[in-house]
Image: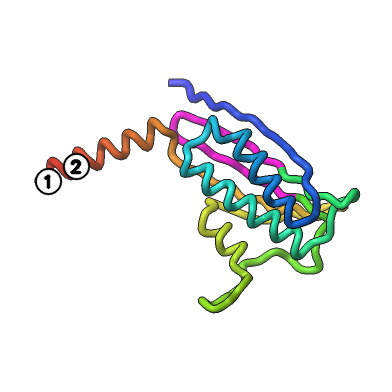
Amino acid sequence: MALTAAERAWCVVVPHHPRGAGQARNRLAAEIGRVVRPELLADVVSVAAELVGNAVRHATPLPGGVIRVAWLVRLTADTQTVVIRVTDGGAGTEPRVRPHDSDSTDGRGLSIVAALAEHWGFERDGLGQSVWARITHPSRDRAAAAIRSAATATSAGD
């Protein structure tokens, strides 16, 4: 049996400003909302907003006062994967999950990313820094099969 996959990539440039996160979320949802499951879309939009928000708060912009947001969608028979990459001018420190307590008013961004993403990381080059996250969910067919299997196992145990 041959495995097939479909891939598509997009890129958008948004202002290095808090409104850039909203612009990135809106564009991302408009582009991939028709092809990925709603649960994956919700996770991807949340991760993108956190990464853009962190770029605005902690990094310098790329030339032109912007941040680049790119994403790749990969669809297979078993999974739907989105890789998000946010590129900015870089920061003085490496991105890392910060410890926080329940009363903290900030510092949760990369904790949220780490919780939702299969993997995340960062890369630096001569132009700046990219923080990326890969989020994978089961495809519709695989998710439906898992639900049917669980229902069958439950009714068999009755």
**Is 136 in front, or is 25?**
25
Going 73% across and 52% down the picture, which residue do you hit?
Answer: 19
Say which residue label 1 marks: 157
Three-letter code for the amino acid on which mark 1 is drawn: Gly
**Main secondary structure type of the part rendered in magenta:** strand
Say whether residue 83 is magenta. yes
Q: Secondary structure at mark 2?
A: helix
Residue with the most extreme left position:
158
Judge left or right: residue 52 versus residue 74: right
Q: Is residue 116 left or right of residue 48?
A: left
Residue extending farthest right: 63
Q: Considering only vertical position in the picture, is 141 above or below 97?
A: above
Q: Amino acid at mark 2?
A: Ala
| Residue under numbered circle 2 | 153
Residue range highlighted in magenta:
70-86
Residue 79 within the magenta-colored segment of the rendering: yes
Identify the residue shown where x is 53% and y is 30%.
35
